[in-house]
Image: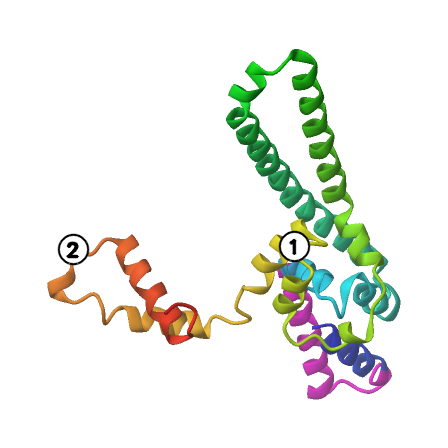
Amino acid sequence: MDYLFVKFRQAAEDTRFEDASHFKSGIDCGWAKLEDYYVKTDRTPVYRAALALHPSYRYDYFERHWKIAMDRPQWYSDMQSAVGSMFEEYARQAEVETQAQAGLVENESGDIDADADDYSSFGKRSIRSSSTQRKMAKAVSELDLFQARPIYPTDLDVANPIEWWKQHQLEYPVLYQMALDLFSIPGMSAECERVFSQTKKMITDERNRLAPKVIEADQLQKHWLMRGLVV
């Protein structure tokens, strides 16, 4: 979309002093339609977050194209806020899971701590608390660390961002979960529509009592087998 935006803007400037024509009308209509799609991307942070987490683009892409080339500094600021808010949601969820795991470990070791002296138990609780706080602080700064990370030659042409994030999941655990959710979204709905059309062949008159969860599980298993994800 950003490429089209630049082309439409250039065409509008080149024909600014020309007489009215179908070509000029086409430019205006195309630009207006493109603006509609930009408005749609504002309804969800997914588009902006996916670019921000792509190792080849990150915030640099928005700064270069939105803030500078397209002269839309407000778009750049809105992008940072949207991506930051989305990351904070994932960070909070990771914090909840971390605390739940810490509580489970503490409960499992409760019997041992009860038999130990109070001083020893106090020290163990302090260590667990400090460890949890360090993990929380690390999660909060992950997005900033990733955006400040130098772009290495291997990052310039990443064809499969999911594979890149798998290799860096220990370095950015929260962003890794966020990236998996974002980059697993199909770029278009054609494949989903084909799966939907194929699924109807499974639900015959003799199988009209199949539960939705059974149908879902069957289709997942089918496509996992086709792609060699399960054996």
User: Element at badge 1?
Assistant: loop
Task: Name above or below for residue 186 compared with residue 130.
Answer: below
In the rendered image, residue 139 lying in the magenta stretch gets the answer no
User: Element at badge 2?
Assistant: loop
In the rendered image, residue 36 lying in the magenta stretch gets the answer yes
Q: Which residue is mark 1?
A: 45
Which is more toward the observer, 87 or 71? 87
Residue at 70% x, 53% y: name it: 172
Residue at 64% x, 56% y: name it: 176
Residue type indicated by callout 2: Arg
Our reading of the magenta stretch's main secondary structure is helix
Q: Is residue 175 left or right of residue 198?
A: right
Calculate the distance from the C-alpha at mark 2 to the C-alpha at mark 1.
Answer: 39 Å
Task: Name above or below for residue 49 compared with residue 125.
Answer: below
Percent of width and height locating residue 231 = 36, 69
Which is more toward the observer, 36 or 173? 173
**Location of residue 221 (image quadrant):** bottom left
**Residue 44 in view of the camera:** no
Residue type indicated by callout 1: Pro
Which mark is drawn over residue 209?
2
Q: Nearer the N terminus, badge 2 or badge 1?
A: 1
Which mark is drawn over residue 122?
none
Camera-side mark, 2 or 1? 2
Percent of width and height locating residue 167 = 66, 64
Q: Is residue 203 left or right of residue 96?
A: left
Label 2 crowd (10 A; few <14 / some 14-19 / many >=20): few
Image quadrant holding the N terminus, namely bottom right
Magenta residues?
A: 14-40
Task: Name above or below for residue 125 compared with residue 187.
Answer: above
Q: Is residue 215 left or right of residue 195?
A: left
Which is more toward the observer, 165 or 216? 165
